[in-house]
């Protein structure tokens, strides 16, 4: 199989509660390439969020392999895996997951802080990223002083400020209205097109699916369709 940024080979995930087993994923194989703007779609319970969590190293498969930039996640120590998540993956969650006591710029530079960037450099990078996502002038506001759409823009800034290999976005438009969702998607499309940021979404939001360059449909834990859209040729 071609080794992309992310490679999945025969990945299964089974959750056990007592003697009861629930199969979330059943032998999924796929590869995600650089600069993709792709989505994992399917109904609730189809396995798409489970798959995103495995790619992000937040969970481990029952069987099969997940590689990120050629590294077998199952072969890494807990410390190595944490470092890989910190340095090479950006996360965007539907609930924003901002630190409420920090300002927008402090949230945006948080991963850079964990990477031990000098204060001046991380502040400059975070400020530049906030400008990219349209929050220039709001850098000193805390999350409770911002709208849902603004908070999600801070989350996007935090996800991309350190230059990750891939950004994993789990239902990023679920908690905002239609106009804000469209604005956020336009922003992420711009980051993909102009900055080459690779995005992989987990969603059942048709607005996200309509903008995807590749649609991987998952049902009952397996891939039932994997196709490029007309937008793929416009990258």
Image (tube, helix red, strand yellow):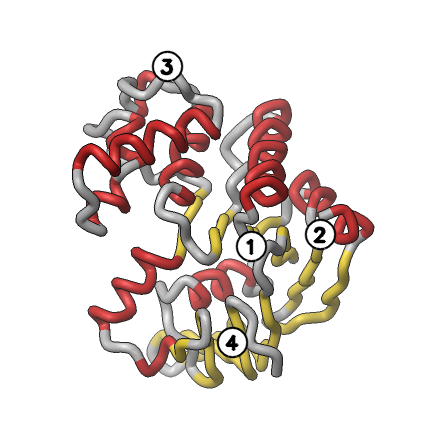
**Residue 146 location, x and y as percent?**
37, 19
One can see residue 148 in this view: no
3 or 2: tag closer to the N-terminus: 3
The answer to whether residue 45 is left or right of residue 128 is right
Q: Relative to 207, does residue 63 appear above or below in the rendering?
A: below
Q: Please give the name of the residue rendered at 63% of the width and 23% of the height, measured from the top-left corner.
A: 179
Residue corresponding to mark 2: 213
One can see residue 100 in this view: yes
Marks 3 and 4, Cα distance to the nearest angstrom? 48 Å
**Counting other residues with Cα less than 10 Å from the Cα at mark 4, is it few (<14), some (14-19), or many (20 or more)?**
some
Marks 4 and 2: which is nearer the front? 2
The answer to whether residue 23 is left or right of residue 108 is right
Marks 3 and 2, Cα distance to the nearest angstrom? 33 Å
Proximity of marks 1 and 2: CB atoms separated by less than 8 Å: no
Q: Which of 43 and 192 is in front in this view?
A: 192
Q: Relative to 122, does residue 102 appear above or below in the rendering?
A: above
Marks 1 and 2, Cα distance to the nearest angstrom? 10 Å
Residue corresponding to mark 1: 200
Residue corresponding to mark 4: 23
Residue corresponding to mark 3: 137
Q: Which secondary structure lies at badge 2? A: loop
Marks 3 and 2: which is nearer the front? 3
Q: Please give the name of the residue rendered at 67% of the width and 62% of the height, measured from the top-left corner.
A: 216
């Amino acid at each position: 199989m071609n080794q992309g940024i992310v490679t999945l080979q025969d990945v299964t995930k089974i959750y056990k509660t007592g003697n009861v087993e629930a199969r979330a994923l059943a032998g999924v194989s796929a590869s995600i390439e650089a600069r993709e703007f792709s989505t994992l779609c399917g109904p609730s319970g189809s396995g798409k969020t489970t798959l995103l969590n495995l790619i992000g190293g937040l969970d481990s498969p029952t069987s099969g392999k997940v590689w990120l930039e050629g590294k077998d996640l199952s072969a890494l120590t807990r410390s190595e895996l944490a470092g890989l998540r910190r340095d090479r993956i950006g996360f965007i969650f539907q609930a924003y997951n901002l630190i409420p006591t920090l300002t927008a710029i402090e949230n945006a530079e948080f991963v850079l802080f964990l990477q031990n960037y000098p204060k001046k450099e991380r502040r400059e990078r975070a400020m530049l990223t906030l400008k990219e996502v349209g929050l220039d002038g709001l850098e000193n506001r805390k999350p409770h002083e911002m709208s849902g759409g603004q908070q999600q823009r801070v989350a996007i800034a935090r996800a991309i400020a350190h230059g990750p290999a891939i950004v994993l976005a789990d239902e990023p438009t679920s908690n905002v209205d239609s106009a804000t969702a469209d604005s956020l998607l336009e922003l992420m499309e711009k980051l993909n097109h102009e900055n080459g940021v690779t995005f992989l979404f987990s969603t059942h939001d048709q607005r996200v699916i309509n903008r995807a360059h590749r649609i991987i449909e998952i049902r009952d834990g397996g891939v039932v369709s994997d196709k490029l859209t007309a937008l793929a040729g416009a990258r």
